[in-house]
């Protein structure tokens, strides 16, 4: 698909059109709700041709995907020195909380996006959402440096457990108005601590620090 050039005056905002569309759609959603956002109105607000917006996003769900991509990028961002030597539960918490923090500025709209995607008549959104969830969990596990090789029984159990933990944490985060998302952080730390005691019984566990992966 060919992009339509959108020219900017010298000194104008150099933010990419893609990011500007996402930010403008989020702004509209904060004022009126996600379901009533229209890309034609976003284009008008940005003063760009609708065709230029279409070249970036086929529909509003694609805009939502770009917003969630920001969360994934934050999850996978560079980590502090010594990260690889942290306990596994701490590494997992760090990665997931980075995702939560990245999307927190538009928490209500994020939840509305998820509800729209999960609406049963919207087969074109909720079915891909399941694959996106699986992909996000796999990235989370890999970025947290869990040692079990992909495809092993232990890795499969970890993926199931982390999927449940991701969804449970998301449910808490969706309604967390505490400062610094403290309630979400306490919930996640508690569940990770509980899970560390369970994973020692999973085939493939090793002694000591190798047995610290979480399970709900």
Image: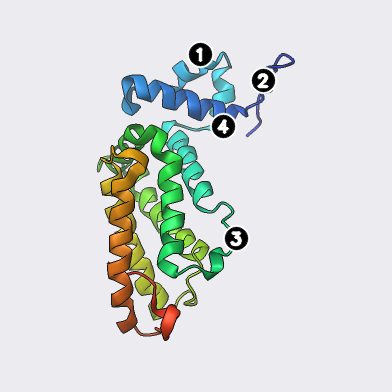
Q: How far apart are marks 1 and 3 (CA)?
A: 45 Å
State the SS at label 1: helix
Q: How far apart are marks 2 and 3 (CA)?
A: 41 Å
Q: Position of residue 7 (x, y in %)?
A: 70, 18
Numbered circle sitting on residue 58: none
Q: Earlier in the sequence, mark 1 or mark 3?
A: 1
Q: Name the residue under label 3.
A: 81
Mark 1 Cα shell of 10 Å, populated few (<14), some (14-19), many (≥20): few
Residue furthest toward the right?
10
Vertical relation: 96 (above or below) 87? above
- Identify the image quadrant of the C terminus: bottom left
In the depicted view, which residue is nearer to us: 166 or 104?
104
Q: Mark 4 points at which residue?
A: 56
Q: Where is residue 102 in the image (x, y as percent from the top left)?
A: 46, 41
Numbered circle sitting on residue 44: 1
In the depicted view, which residue is nearer to us: 185 or 53?
185
Q: Earlier in the sequence, mark 1 or mark 2?
A: 2
Mark 2 Cα shell of 10 Å, populated few (<14), some (14-19), many (≥20): few
Q: Which of marks 2 and 3 is nearer the N terminus?
A: 2
Q: Mark 2 points at which residue?
A: 6
Residue 167 appears in view: no
State the SS at label 2: loop
Q: How far apart are marks 2 and 4 (CA)?
A: 12 Å
Dot in front, 1 or 3: 3
Mark 3 Cα shell of 10 Å, populated few (<14), some (14-19), many (≥20): few
Question: Residue drawn at (26%, 47%), measured in percent from left and top?
Answer: 172
Q: Where is residue 21 in the image (x, y as percent from the top left)?
A: 52, 26
Task: Describe the colour scheme in one phrase.
Answer: rainbow
């Amino acid at each position: 698909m060919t992009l339509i050039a959108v020219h900017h005056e010298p000194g104008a905002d150099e933010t990419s059109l893609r990011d500007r569309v996402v930010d403008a759609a989020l702004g509209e959603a904060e004022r009126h709700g996600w379901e009533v956002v229209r890309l034609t109105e976003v284009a008008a607000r940005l003063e760009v041709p609708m065709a230029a917006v279409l070249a970036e996003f086929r529909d509003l769900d694609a805009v939502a995907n770009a917003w969630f991509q920001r969360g994934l990028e934050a999850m996978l961002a560079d980590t502090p020195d010594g990260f690889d030597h942290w306990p596994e539960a701490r590494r997992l918490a760090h990665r997931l909380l980075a995702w939560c923090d990245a999307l927190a500025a538009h928490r209500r709209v994020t939840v509305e996006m998820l509800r729209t995607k999960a609406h049963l008549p919207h087969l074109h959104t909720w079915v891909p959402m399941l694959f996106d969830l699986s992909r996000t969990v796999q990235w989370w596990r890999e970025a947290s440096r869990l040692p079990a090789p992909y495809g092993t029984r232990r890795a499969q159990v970890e993926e199931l457990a982390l999927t449940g933990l991701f969804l449970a944490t998301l449910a808490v985060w969706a309604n967390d108005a505490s400062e610094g998302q403290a309630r979400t952080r306490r919930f996640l730390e508690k569940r990770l601590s509980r899970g560390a005691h369970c994973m020692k019984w999973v085939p493939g566990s090793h002694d000591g620090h190798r047995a610290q992966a979480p399970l709900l």
